[in-house]
Amino acid sequence: MASVTDTRSKARPQEPAKDKAAKDKAAKGKTAQGKVPMSRRDDRWRVSPLTLRILAVNVLALALLVVGLLYLGRYQDRLIQAELEALATEARIFASALGEGAVQRAATADESGQESYELSPELGRQMVRRLALATETHTRLFGVDGTLLSDSRVLTGSAGKIEIRELPAPPAGDPVSSTINDLYARFIDVVPSREGLPLYREEPGRSSAPRPAAQWPDVERALAGEIGATVWRVESPGARSDLLLTVAVPVQRYKEVLGAVLLSCSGAEIDGAIRSVRSDILKVFAVALLVTVALSFYLAGTIARPIRRLAQAADRVRTGHGRHAEIPDFTRRGDEIGELSGVLRDMTAALWARMDAIERFAADVAHEIKNPLTSLRSAVETVNRIEDPGRRARLMAIIADDVQRLDRLISDISNASRLDAELSRAELEPVNLGAMLSMLADIHRATATPATATSEDNAPPPRLAVELPAGGNLTVPGLEGRLTQVFQNLIANAVSFSPPGGVVRLAARTVNGNGRSGVEITVSDDGPGIPEGKEDAIFERFYTERPAGEKFGIHSGLGLSISKQIVEAHGGTITAANRRAPNGEIIGAAFTVRLPRA
């Protein structure tokens, strides 16, 4: 049977008032040195930084998409191209009509003496005015030498010339609309940029004098027999730039170029169409922005708020003086935050359990050390008053036993206190349990003497019988030294409780269950068994219940407790039970250790 220890209910020692006050003062000092409580940090962050980041990322992605849609460069190019084609068609119609109806014979023949033709300025003015009435284009007629013959916006009468000019649109009445229009005007100059377009300027007096080709490139090309088209940039009051489209077509009669007709129109319709499309895009953007912001706050709420609650709860656990603070349970979420919540709850429970174990361990150690110290004190106080050499020798023997007991107890306590740290740092390696059990059995046979028996000096000691499966894989990951310590404790325990000539059986086998494979080792003896109801208590610290006649104090009661700690650190379990005969009689004890293979 195993080395059993006596269970005592140990009350947690009351913390002295002075120590508690000192701890409270130290905690306050730590907070004052820069550790701001979580509740105060929350006041500085009305909106979570994580919320702001999520919002920024989502809005930035949407904004980049909208800016790309608002560019509309190719859409504007297609509109300009369609407008130029329509303007060129009108110009060809005007040129054909002028070539038929505004041509007269020239006063002089050409150099070859043949009859030639020229444009009639008067007929040209009348036809240009009538043709331009049906369209909204500005129509000009040029002679073959580049002279302006007619302008649809210049009326000629007896009182002189009247020039018709389009007035710019009146500015928006309220400041808000004016500001919006100004911003939009600056925007359309950049997206797409109009800085690369040639600048168009109307100059005073330019309608009467011949124009150089550099100022009228379309007219120059038309007088050369080709169709010319140009897109101009016109400076307008304010910040915006307007578009002006011009197309020049040659006026011909029998393939002879007699002049050129120049049609120009404003790009206001193009700007209006683009502005309409952009307005629709911005409306969709506004709706999408509202949805994005709402979803961002919802997403941030499902992430930031639970994380903040977990952080606040962890802070309360750290700074609190009791166990009232609990980690919120978000495990039902089924996501990473739920997993974090569960891990934090398990960690907190493990910390409290470890703190309780440390407190109990300290109280148990103090209690166990106090017993031999009390015996030592009594013996030391008595030895000076005894003059009988025999009694004094017996007292000195008691003092020596108590000192050995203290030394053994302190060594076992030291090993137990270092065990946790060692198990947490060490790397697991493959351990062959079959070879280990065989080695322990060989060591026992080689070192066993009749003196190990418990009743008669010449009686044979208990023998070890090892039962291993043929060809079974009994290798598990673990620390070989610590697992050896476990089975040494169990074997020594079984041997100490076995009768002379008894058998201690070591049996191992592979087991499978709950989707896991492992190795099960059983150490059984023929001793008196375990007291009823103490099957779990024997694994507690300092619980000792030894065989009758054994010298008191040679066991500290930590062997089975340390064995259980080692087995559980390997992910296994250790249990104890009585062996019974068919009639129910207890015929021994059996300890079962189960270790996983992975």
Image (cartoon, helix red, strand yellow):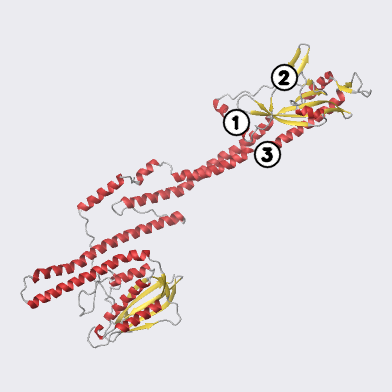
Three-letter amino acid code at the position of disc 3: Arg
Separation of marks 1 and 2 at Cα, in angstroms: 29 Å
For disc 1, the marked residue is: 186
At numbered mark 2, what does the secondary structure look like: helix, strand or loop?
loop
Corner quadrant of residue 361:
bottom left
Residue depicted at x 29% and y 68%: 415
Using a 10 Å C-alpha cutoff, classify the residue at mark 3 as few (fewer than 14 neighbours), some (14 to 19) or many (20 or more): few
The foreground one among 130 and 35 is: 35
77 w.r.t. 314: above or below: above
Q: Of label 3 and label 2, which has the lower sequence position?
A: 3
For disc 2, the marked residue is: 164
Task: Return the x and y of residue 13 as percentages of the image width and height.
Answer: 22, 59
Q: Is residue 153 left or right of residue 452?
A: right
Separation of marks 3 and 2 at Cα, in angstroms: 34 Å
Q: Of label 3 and label 1, which has the lower sequence position?
A: 3
Task: Return the x and y of residue 565 as percentages of the image width and height.
Answer: 33, 68
118 w.r.t. 406: above or below: above
Task: Return the x and y of residue 274 as percentages of the image width and height.
Answer: 65, 35
**Res 291 seen here:** no
Residue depicted at x 41% and y 81%: 468
507 w.r.t. 16: above or below: below
At numbered mark 1, what does the secondary structure look like: helix, strand or loop?
helix
**Which label number is shown at residue 74?**
3
Residue depicted at x 33% and y 50%: 316
